Image: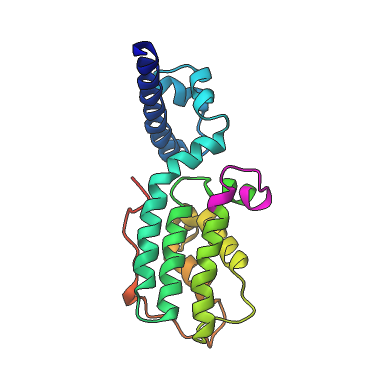
Amino acid sequence: MRAQTSKRTDARRNRGLILEAAKAAFGRDGVHASLDEIARSAGVGPATLYRHFPTREHLLCEVLHERQAVLLALRDEALALPDAKSALYGWMTALGDYLGAFNGLPQPFIDAFEAQASPLAVTCRTLVAITDEFLARAKADGAARQSVCAPALFLSALGAAFVHDKAGRYGTTPEQVEAIQAFGYLTGHPAVDTSHSIRKTGAFHD
């Protein structure tokens, strides 16, 4: 019994060390960081890493759990905003920040969007469903076009996240990209009141 308890304790410790190493590696090198290097940083062998996390997507999904809790808290703040347009904008801003937390993060979500077998598929479907709730409220309030659908909005957020950290190289800012995403590039589209923004600077970036 004592030996089994010790093994479980060691397994929990190794799992925690792997997650901390992965969080640091993804933050530094993006989601395609070397898994072997993550294992070395955690002080375990590759076999131990793969025993806990069979694929890169399983490891990424676990690392994102903490950030998902932050995102859901921001969702609740967006729900409390005074009008449907500001609420939808607030949610899309928080979603964009989450999807841009690690360099290259949008790609695994696109893969999950297309292949439901991915461990990120449930997260992907949940985020689309939440987006649909905000969009439905905005449509009912006349603040969003009836032709817009939640999957399209989610994909647009993924697209903006792809270029989030590259905007400065091209003479623009992430905020300008987000404004085009939200309001289009044609005239005659009134802007949302961004004074109710729920963005928390650095909420998803260490």
Q: Residue at x 48, y 72 (%)?
A: 134
| Outermost residue, front side | 1
Residue 168, percent across and down? 44, 57
Q: Is residue 197 magenta?
A: no
Establish if 71 lies above or below 116.
below
Establish if 203 lies above or below 154.
above
Quarter that holds the C terminus:
top left
Give the residues drawn in magenta, as a range.
112-123
> Position of 23 compared to 151: left or right?
left
The total of numbered circles placed on residues is 0
Q: Nearer the viewer, residue 154 or 101?
A: 154
Q: Which of 134 and 22 is in front in this view?
A: 134
Q: Which residue is drawn at 37% across and 29% down?
A: 16
Quarter that holds the N terminus:
top left
Residue 34, percent across and down? 51, 28
Q: Which of 3 and 190 is in front in this view?
A: 3
Q: Can residue 203 be seen in this view?
A: yes
Residue 83, percent across and down? 39, 81
| Outermost residue, top side | 3
Q: Does the magenta stretch include residue 121?
A: yes
Establish if 140 lies above or below 2.
below
Q: Is residue 173 visible?
A: no
Residue 107, percent across and down? 59, 47
Which colour style is shown?
rainbow
Q: Residue at x 51, y 22 (%)?
A: 36
> Position of 81 compared to 84: left or right?
left
Q: Residue at x 61, y 81 (%)?
A: 146
